Image (cartoon, coloured by chain):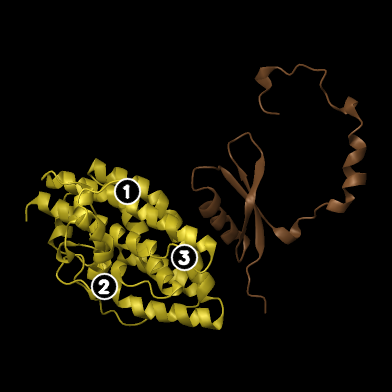
């Protein structure tokens, strides 16, 4: 694989993660259990969409086919998306949304910290800006996981159920393939597998404060970041997200 | 059992050198979350450099029915207003 293709795949992975999760989180707008959480979730969604503009903007630039970040976000189909399966999982109840956010934020914060010293200055600059936002996302989702996990009997049971439901999707974030090998050898991005120990430390600390039990199973569902097979949920999400620019090409406000 | 989160009053310092101002209130389970919620609800447009939160029931307030004895006596004491001095522009916000 030519290095430019690998670089573009890497950028799509970063941008599609933030795009799909940003859209998922935005689905809570107007529906969160309390006003304060509603606004906080909307802020998180907007941060993620902002990061998407930077990652997909750079992906389009590297691709140099005259496309924009919007073209990549709105005119690709399911099989072209490179996000991990975790971020396309449905919101479920508030606890499941927060658990998904926490499991992703923990990976995201470690990834961005490593990317700040990327050999590619553009990647390092995006990571620098995004990592401030993500540090806050992690603080917030981590605190909420502890609050709900170590809360009432019902909140504890819901958080444990969310953890067990989402746990099979964690492993994919640490999978490595030829794209990762190319990025690592050029010093552009870390090999995801090398982040697993830091990740396990971080989530272990928070989940134990939350009195939650990490499932034993290490089986990982995969197929998102290489586009081999997304879950059935992504197509439905894209129909919602893409219908307007597809029905009204070039629409603006 | 009370299931509502307590109410917190939020104070934000807009810039260095200014004092914290009351901007509103919100609900949160504890002080830490109250600061986070204040960050999300009241500083979205770059409004602040510092946040204070205080649980609303910890604020002692004067009673509106006392306003006669509390405030009216100062109305007739115009000599308490330092209107005789020119304040140099350099002083800035006082």
Instruction: Point out residue A108 in the picture as x, y percentages from the top left corner.
Output: 34, 59
Residue A53 left/right relative to A200: left
In front of the other: A184 or A243 = A243
Alpha carbon separation for disc pair 1 and 3:
21 Å
Distance (Cα) linking label 2 and label 3 = 25 Å
Quadrant occupied by the N terminus of chain B: bottom right
Could you say where residue A191 lies in the image, as x and y percent from the top left? 22, 59
User: What chain is tagged by disc 3?
Assistant: A
Q: Is there any visible trace of residue A106 in the rendered image?
A: no
Which element is circle 3 on?
A: helix
Residue B45 or residue B15, whichever sits in front:
B45
Image location (x, y in percent) of residue A33: 51, 69
- Residue B4, relative to residue A128: is it above or below? below
* Mark sitting earlier along the chain (2/3): 3
Figure disc tally: 3
Q: Quick check: do tags 1 and 3 share a chain?
A: yes
Q: Residue at x 31, y 45 (%)?
A: A253
Identify the chain of the residue marked 1, using the numbered disc in the image: A
The residue carrying pointer 3 sits among few (fewer than 14), some (14 to 19) or many (20 or more) residues within 10 Å by Cα, namely: many
Residue A76's quadrant in the figure? bottom left
Q: Which residue is mark 1?
A: A127
**Front-most of residues A63 and A25:** A25
Give yes or no for contact between labels 2 and 1 (Cβ–Cβ under 8 Å).
no
Q: Name which residue lies at 91% across and 30% down.
A: B77
Looking at the image, residue B20 sits to the left or right of residue A166; the answer is right
Q: Name chain A's colour.
A: yellow
Q: Quadrant of the C terminus of chain B?
A: top right
State whether residue A80 appears in this view: yes
**Which residue is denoted by mark 3 in the rendering?**
A142
Q: Which chain is brown?
A: B
Badge 2 is on which residue? A233
Q: Are marks 1 and 3 in contact (CB under 8 Å)?
A: no
């Amino acid at each position: 694989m030519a290095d430019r293709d690998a670089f573009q795949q890497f950028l799509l992975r970063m941008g599609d993660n933030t795009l799909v999760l940003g859209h998922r989180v935005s689905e809570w707008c107007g529906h969160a259990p309390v006003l304060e959480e509603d606004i906080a979730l909307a802020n998180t969604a907007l941060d993620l969409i902002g990061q998407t503009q930077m990652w997909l903007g750079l992906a389009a630039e590297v691709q140099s086919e005259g496309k924009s970040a919007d073209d990549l976000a709105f005119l690709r189909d399911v099989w072209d998306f490179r996000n991990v399966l975790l971020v396309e999982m449905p919101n479920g109840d508030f606890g499941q949304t927060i658990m998904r956010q926490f499991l992703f934020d923990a990976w995201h914060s470690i990834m961005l910290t490593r990317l700040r010293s990327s050999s590619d200055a553009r990647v390092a600059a995006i990571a620098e800006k995004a990592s401030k936002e993500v540090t806050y996302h992690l603080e917030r989702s981590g605190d909420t996981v502890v609050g709900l996990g170590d809360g009432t009997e019902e909140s504890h049971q819901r958080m444990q159920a969310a953890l067990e439901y989402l746990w099979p999707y964690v492993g994919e974030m640490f999978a490595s393939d030829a794209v990762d090998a190319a990025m690592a050898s050029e010093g552009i991005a870390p090999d995801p597998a090398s982040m697993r120990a830091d990740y396990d430390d971080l989530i272990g600390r928070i989940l134990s404060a939350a009195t939650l039990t990490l499932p034993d199973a290490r089986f990982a569902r995969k197929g998102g970041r290489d586009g081999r097979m997304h879950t059935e949920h992504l197509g439905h999400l894209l129909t919602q997200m893409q219908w307007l620019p597809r029905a009204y090409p070039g629409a603006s406000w | 059992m009370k299931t509502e989160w307590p109410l917190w009053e939020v104070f934000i310092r807009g810039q260095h050198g200014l004092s914290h101002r009351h901007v509103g209130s919100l609900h949160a389970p504890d002080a830490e979350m109250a600061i986070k919620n204040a960050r999300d609800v009241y500083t979205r447009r770059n409004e602040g450099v510092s946040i204070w939160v205080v649980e609303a029931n910890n604020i002692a307030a004067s009673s509106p029915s006392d306003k006669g004895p509390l405030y009216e006596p100062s109305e007739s004491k115009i000599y308490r207003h330092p209107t005789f001095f020119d304040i140099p522009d350099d002083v800035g916000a006082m």
